[in-house]
Amino acid sequence: MKRKYLLLAVVVLCLGGETTLAQPYVNATAIVSGSPNDTIDFGFIRAYHIGDFVWEDDGDGIQSDYERLHKGIKDVEVQLFENNIPKDITYTNDTGYYWFYVGNGTYEVRINMSQVKLAGMINTTPNVGPYDRDSNGIPAS
Ligand SMILES: [Ca+2]
Ligand SMILES: [Ca+2]
């Protein structure tokens, strides 16, 4: 039986339980003149994000400047879980970059190794540092 592996990375975002953002309120001007105004909407995004790159490594576990510029893998599906519950799915862009908007919490970022974009590839050495350039995927079954 073919074994399928997932790459997992656990991310903890905790920037203070009561992080105060520099937005006491948001507002919009609403003009009403002879008919209802149903155009005043408010969109919000989560204040933080998780990212960043999926790339083809030379095996040292570190994304070099060259690899950052030339070895990103596009269209890789990346999944976000919170408490083992699927929360979001995204795909890497042309440079291999991905991100999820999130709030404070502990998340799992998961990449399914059975996808076509990763055919013939295996996991590089994880967590060798520095943290902003190393690979964090841990094989799981
Ligand atoms: Ca490398
Ligand atoms: Ca890293």
Image (spheres, rainbow, N blue to C red):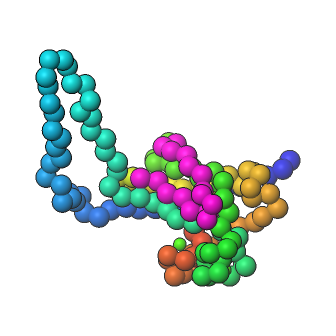
Expressed as whole percent of the image width and height from the top left, the position of residue 94 reads 63, 60
Instruction: Give the side of residue 59 with respect to residue 132, left or right.
Output: right
- Magenta segment range? 86-101
Q: Is residue 32 above or below residue 61?
A: above
Q: Residue at x 55, y 46 (%)?
A: 89
Q: Residue at x 75, y 58 (%)?
A: 118
Looking at the image, which is closer to me, 41 or 64? Answer: 41
- Picture quarter with the C terminus: bottom right
Extreme right residue here?
1
Q: Quadrant of residue 8?
A: bottom right
- In reply to whether residue 87 is colored magenta, the answer given is yes
103 magenta-colored: no
Q: Is residue 13 left or right of residue 71?
A: left
Residue beneath the point at 68% across and 71% down: 71
To which quarter of the image does residue 43 belong? top left
Asked whether residue 85 is in view, the answer is yes
> On the rendered structure, is 105 left or right of 78?
left
Nearer the observer, 79 or 12 = 79
Return the x and y of residue 99 as percentages of the image width and height.
49, 57
Residue at 29% of width from left, 64% of height from top?
A: 15
Q: Position of residue 132 (x, y in %)?
A: 50, 76
> Total of numbered circles in the picture?
0
To which quarter of the image does residue 140 belong? bottom right
Give whichever of 131, 69 is nearer the camera.
69
Residue 9, percent across and down?
A: 55, 62
Between 57 and 25, the one nearer to me in the picture: 25
**41 w.r.t. 33: above or below:** below
- Residue 4 can be seen, yes or no: no
